[in-house]
């Protein structure tokens, strides 16, 4: 986050995928279209305002809003991740503090009041979206529709991309997955309290971000879009160095370009990293890429990528995301 605790305000962009129906936190997967169908890539949809974002620095549409309190940012983030559901006072306290202070309820009430004021500075009346629930559901929540929030757009685009990838429509998969990763403006969880709840969500959401990049790079290889791809893979490996599949894809790109030396260099780097940091042998998929490079076998490298993509896509079909985020 910029100096001074600035909450970045994000203006919606054209060319992003349309979202799921309102109040659907995690869109379910659509049926994979037949491989023979044309691959429509939607580019004209515009996200409605206001647009809330957690994929990177916390964002709300409009202008830059000064928020100095990480707890206040955490309140908005938690409400976004659980939108459509009230968060009870006791649960909110555990979200914001690993060891809630005696004054947790009063502190939370104060931060909610401040958050409403901050949102009203963006747009009069926007603070009313932060609802107070009384009675058996005593707590707070955020009243927004799914299409106003970037996370459901991301999960929907990823699912479309995986469906196309599984169907063998690689160009369409690239289009959908580029839309998905384009929604990210950096890692999730910047400048949030390091509580157990947020740490779990940081790990989980950043993990699905890297999954989406792997799917995108796989589809790009299979679509023959390998120009500058090695550079893009290297940039993600810098953030997630222990992801075996990324190393496989990087080695495959060099092999497909006829660069056996580049492939063997990637294999050596991976082997050293896994041995020194993790005490592991070279992963079998990397070893297979080395064999393909030594035999100057580009077709085998492509077959290995396609085989890995099929297994990964089928696994994702079985591991569908939940309809709502876990508490």
Image: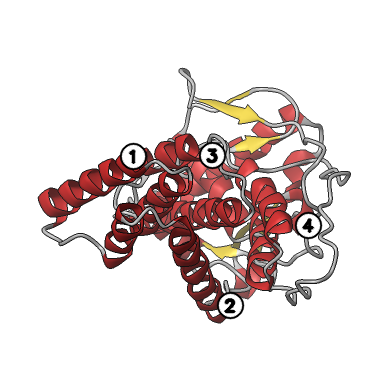
Name the residue beneath numbered marker 3: 56
Residue 124: x percent and y percent? 81, 32
Q: Are marks 3 and 1 in contact (CB under 8 Å)?
A: no
Q: Is residue 290 above or below residue 69?
A: below
Residue 324: x percent and y percent? 60, 70
Do we see residue 97 in this rendering?
A: no
Q: Of circles 1 and 4, which is in front?
A: 1
Task: Give the number of the disc on residue 113.
Answer: none
Direction from residue 200 to residue 182 in the image, left or right = right
Direction from residue 14 to residue 172 in the image, left or right = left
Q: Quadrant of residue 117 in the image?
A: top right
Q: CA distance from mark 2 to mark 1?
A: 34 Å
Q: Are marks 2 and 4 in contact (CB under 8 Å)?
A: no
Q: Quadrant of residue 223 in the image?
A: bottom right
Q: Earlier in the sequence, mark 2 or mark 4?
A: 4
Name the residue beneath numbered marker 4: 19
Q: Of circles 2 and 1, which is in front?
A: 1
Q: Earlier in the sequence, mark 1 or mark 4?
A: 4
Q: Earlier in the sequence, mark 2 or mark 1?
A: 1
Do we see residue 113 in this rendering?
A: yes
Q: Nearer the viewer, residue 307 or 136?
A: 307
């Amino acid at each position: 986050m910029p100096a001074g605790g600035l909450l970045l305000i994000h203006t919606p962009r054209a060319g992003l995928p349309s979202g799921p129906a309102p109040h659907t936190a995690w869109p379910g997967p659509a049926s994979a279209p037949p491989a023979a169908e044309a691959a429509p890539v939607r580019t004209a949809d515009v996200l409605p305002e206001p647009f809330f974002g957690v994929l990177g620095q916390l964002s709300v549409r409009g202008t830059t809003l000064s928020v100095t309190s990480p707890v206040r940012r955490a309140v908005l983030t938690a409400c976004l991740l659980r939108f459509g559901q009230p968060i009870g006072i006791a649960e909110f306290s555990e979200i914001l503090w690993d060891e809630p202070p005696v004054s947790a309820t009063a502190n939370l009430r104060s931060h909610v009041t401040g958050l409403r004021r901050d949102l009203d500075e963006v747009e009069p009346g926007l603070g009313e979206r932060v609802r107070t629930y009384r009675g058996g559901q005593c707590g707070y929540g955020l009243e927004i529709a799914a299409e106003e929030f970037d996370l459901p757009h991301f999960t929907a685009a990823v699912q479309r991309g995986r469906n196309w990838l599984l169907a063998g429509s690689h160009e369409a998969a690239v289009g959908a997955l580029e839309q998905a990763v384009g929604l990210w403006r950096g890692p999730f969880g910047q400048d949030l309290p390091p509580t157990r709840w947020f740490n779990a969500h940081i790990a989980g959401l950043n993990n699905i971000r890297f999954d989406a990049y792997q799917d995108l790079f796989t589809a790009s290889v299979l679509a023959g879009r390998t120009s500058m791809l090695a550079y893009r893979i290297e940039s993600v490996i810098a953030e997630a160095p222990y992801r075996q599949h990324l190393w496989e894809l990087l080695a495959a790109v060099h092999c497909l370009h006829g660069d056996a030396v580049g492939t063997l260099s990637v294999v050596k780097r991976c082997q050293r990293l896994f041995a020194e940091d993790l005490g592991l042998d070279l992963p079998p998929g990397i070893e297979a890429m080395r064999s393909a490079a030594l035999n100057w076998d580009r077709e085998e490298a492509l077959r290995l990528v396609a085989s890995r993509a099929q297994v990964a896509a089928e696994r994702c079909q079985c591991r569908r995301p939940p309809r709502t985020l876990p508490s």
